[in-house]
Amino acid sequence: EVRFLEDTYKSEIELFQIRNNYLTFYAGCDWSSGKHALFGDYSAIIVLAKDSETNVIYVVCADIARRRTSKILDDIISYCKVWPIRKFAIETNQAQDILADLLQEGLRKEDLSTEVVRIVQAGDKKERIHNLQPLINTARLVFSKRHHLLLEQLKYFPRGRHEDGLDALEMAVRLAGCKKAFNPDEYIKLLQACKGNLPSKNPNDFFIQGGQFIPNPFRLLKAK
């Protein structure tokens, strides 16, 4: 079941006040931007706070909006002023490497120590996003009820129209040092052991972790 920050804390502010000494901040940006600020693609800025004692990751900012490139740069720098973000992931496929240069220069001018991490994406985007499932199932990745667009993308994944927020989230989680807990060999071994007697006829309803069938959190969220 998807866990929310509000289940434990009144707000992000209370989280910061109580767990401040244990929190490290990471962020990611899906830089999709269009020429038209109203009708272009969404861009997404995700900021995470990782608790070093519990290894729980909290989504403290999910800014998903249509905006021009200059506005994306300004917003990222603003967030780096608000939170002491250690590392910021930027996808640098195609011509986006130039944008990473502009961000790095902007941070330098503001005397901010945030490290810009350039990520060249490879493989299937949906598979990368699916890697978040074990973290969600084990309540190591915690969302906020305030982030409506991110939750909407989560609800309709993988058939939704937009995945910008989830893509930025996956990059930020990667920076935080969390990897998927999934072993393909384990999956095949368990399928052979159960001789095809799966808990559901729909393979999207579950995945394998630790030798057990685990409900897919994306499907659980849809059912609510």
Image: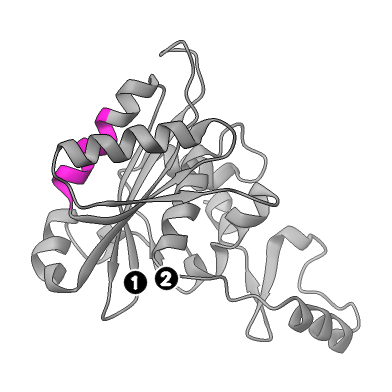
Q: Establish if 170 lies above or below 155.
A: below
Q: Residue at x 82, y 86 (%)?
A: 189
Viewer-proximal residue among 101 and 181: 101
Locate residue 35 relative to residue 209 in the image: left or right: left
| Percent coordinates x, y for residue 10 in the rendering | 16, 58
Contact (Cβ within 8 Å) of mark 1 with mark 2: yes
| Amino acid type assigned to the residue bearing label 2 in the image | Ala
| Percent coordinates x, y for residue 68 in the rendering | 38, 19
Locate residue 76 relative to residue 92 in the image: left or right: left
Q: Upstream in the sequence, badge 1 or badge 2?
A: 1
- Residue 176: mark: none
Locate residue 138 relative to residue 83 in the image: left or right: right
Q: Could you tell me what secondary structure mostly forms the magenta stretch?
A: helix
Residue denoted by label 1: 56
Q: Nearer the viewer, mark 1 or mark 2?
A: 1
Viewer-proximal residue among 199 and 11: 11
Q: Is residue 76 magenta?
A: yes
- Residue 139: mark: 2
Q: Is residue 124 magenta?
A: no
